[in-house]
Amino acid sequence: MNLAAAGAHPGFLSPTGVEIVFVLVGLATLGAALVTVTTKQLVHAALWLVAALGGVAVEYLLLTAEFIAWVQVLIYVGSVVVLLLFGLMLTKAPIGPSPDADSGNRWIALGVAVVSAATLVTLVVDAFRTTWIDLSTSPKGSTRVTGEALFRGWVLPFEALSVLLLAALVGAIVLSRRGAPETDEAEPETKQEGQR
Amino acid sequence: MAGPSPDHRPSRKPSGRPSFPGSGLAKGLAVTLRTMTRRSVTAHYPDVQPELPPRSRGVIGLFEENCTVCMLCARECPDWCIYIDSHKETMPAATPGGRERSRNVLDRFAIDFALCMYCGICIDVCPFDALFWSPEFEYAETDIRDLTHERDKLREWMWTVPEPPPLDPAAEEPKELGAARKAADKLAAQQAEPEQQQAAAPDGQDRSGPEGRSQPEGPSGPGGASGQDGASGPDKREQGGDS
Amino acid sequence: MDVVDVLWRLLAVLLAFLLLPLIVGQAEHKAMAHMQGRVGPMYAGGFHGWAQLVADGVKFAQKEDIVPGGADRRVFQLAPAIALLPYLIVLIAIPVGDGDQVGQVVDAGVFFVLAVMGVGVLGSLMGGWASANKFSLLGGLRTAAQLLAYELPMLLAAASVAMAAGTLSLPGILDAWQWWWLPWQIIGGLVFFTAGLAELQRPPFDAPVADSEIIFGAYTEYTGLRFALFLLAEYAGIVVLSALTAVLFLGGWHGPAAGELGWVWTLLKTAALAFVVIWLRVSYPRLREDQIQRVAWTVLVPLALLQIALTGVVKVVIQ
């Protein structure tokens, strides 16, 4: 997690203020994430998710990746969580604990989480090792740099992703129009598309 | 905003020339903007006194000199908010050897404005023009009992009763004027009589007949008669009845 | 940038945040009254009731702070702050004049502003859910649906300007601004302003607080200062939306004598747009919930896409 602080060259025994803040925010984010998955109250989980996602956005900011940080807030906090809350309100999430929301897969979920976390941490640590990136001199996360990387170096994956999203969008529209005078014939097709 | 519901559109649009899309929205904005540039219609009441029409029903004034304690108002009042006390007095005969007369003397006349519903029936039924509407309305009290206005207070309101408004230009002549003209004609005829006594015209005799009949109409006409006219009404009627 | 400079800037932003919403609120009192043939508040403060909102604030402060028995206490109490604070933060990034007359230059300013404004709606959602009241819940639902529908056209319209300027930074957009952008971006400006109105739940898009149907939506159970904070958030939102529209689409500080009077131009344009917000409230009836959704998806989104296409075409042609 504390990648910037782990760099070797200037030594991390005398961390700068930014690094200390980075670690603290990281701990807070981790705590919020833990509460998100352990709380018994559905809407509280969604609100703690806001805190966790916001914490991640702050981490991006501290790494000078401004664009990514604001997109994180815009998409995840502003839209995904709102959608989540919308769904919870539609299902009349009760105030107070809802014991029936526990699916009983606690240990499996923990296993998946640990494995994926281990994979990610290994990947990141292995990728950067002891590389020291001086944030003050190379603004790698600014809008211009991000845009150039996205639309020059990685334009093909970007476009492929857009096509995937478009397919998902079309699939969602078709699925939601099930009540229309379509015959049952069309349904398997649309389901496939939605799953993609 | 332009066309939210195509199925609602045709029914809402009035038949006629096709309007530019969004013209209805612009019209709405124009209406509010135009209203903003005009003077507001708000009455600034406590700062500026309202200009009330003369026949506003503010408070009821009592012209007690006209009251004969006939009790009509108290009886007709739908919510019984008029209280009248009186006693009888006998008056010595006006002429020696004449009959003694008894008359009612007003002791108490009170209107409870906490009960009054401002229907104005008492004013309509008063045959002697003793009750009048005044536009005064600022007599709120902190104690509900103070809303019962006694005789002296009701008399005070009389000073605020405005002059009746002039009639419309094409309106029918008020009945008081007809009655007064007849009285004046009769007076003139009486004055002319001594000079033409030889030619005793039967017209004079005839005239007294219709005049007697027309008299009662005078006082009960529309409340335009001023106090003095009204005061002479009952007297005349009594005389008319006697003679 | 030393500490004193930062403090001064923060103080100025805070002052604007406290003052401008009150001015807009008072302007709404008076303008709405006169548009309806009334005079509005006349007594508080003496001259034409200029201190009416101060008096209202005193009144709100005196009221008892009630939390409903069945409510989720902490979420309920936290919601007004969540609703209000984003607008304060957004004001930091809005430039009022040329050069460094801005609280803080943010590189991805457009995204920053829209992202943080979107967070403010979370306050309404939290209040709506935590009140333990069916009307509040309905108001929260409507708020969420409205936000999801209108965030997209608003973003697309803002993206159009960013495309035209070639930068996401608000001062950068203003530096690149030319007068002919006004007709060029007019569709985007209308879409942005309309979508912003809907996000603020201002009439005619105020179905989430429709008093004739669901009392006051998410704010039904609130009293006292917390209710005042929600109201303040609404007016701060008007200020932010007007200022943003002025900066993105009307050229911000551009105008005659922009060198010295740039900030006056920004304020004037913001005030004019705030007046339009009030004007629309008086003029139009409330849209029904399905109409609100339909306007977003069938009118605003296609218009915003059209604007983006237009921007792209013109941008390529003039290069």
Image: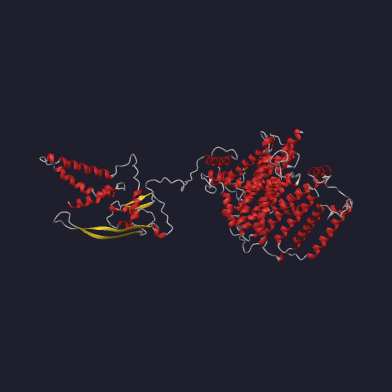
Residue at 34% from the left image edge and 50% from the top image edge = B158
- Residue B170, x across and y down, in percent: 33, 39
Q: Classify residue B204 by image quadrant.
A: top left
**Would residue C271 be seen by someone viewing this image from the given angle?**
yes
Q: Between residues C234 and C218, which one lies in front from this camera angle?
A: C234
From the viewer's perspective, is C219 left or right of B60?
right
Q: Classify residue C24 by image quadrant.
A: top right
Q: Between residues C99 and A113, which one lies in front from this camera angle?
A: C99
- Residue C1, x across and y down, in percent: 76, 44
- Locate the N terminus of chain A by quadrant: bottom right
Q: Taking B139 as reference, is C318 above or below it? A: above
Q: Taking C60 as reference, is A156 above or below it? A: above
- Residue B63, x across and y down, in percent: 31, 52
**Would residue C198 be seen by someone viewing this image from the given angle?**
no
- Residue B107, x across and y down, in percent: 29, 59
Residue at 28% from the left image edge and 54% from the top image edge = B67
From the viewer's perspective, is C193 left or right of B233?
right
Q: Classify residue B31 by image quadrant.
A: top right
Specify the farthest residue to the left: B198
Residue at 66% from the left image edge and 52% from the top image edge = C84
Residue at 35% from the left image edge and 43% from the top image edge = B165
Q: Taking B60 as reference, is C67 above or below it? A: below
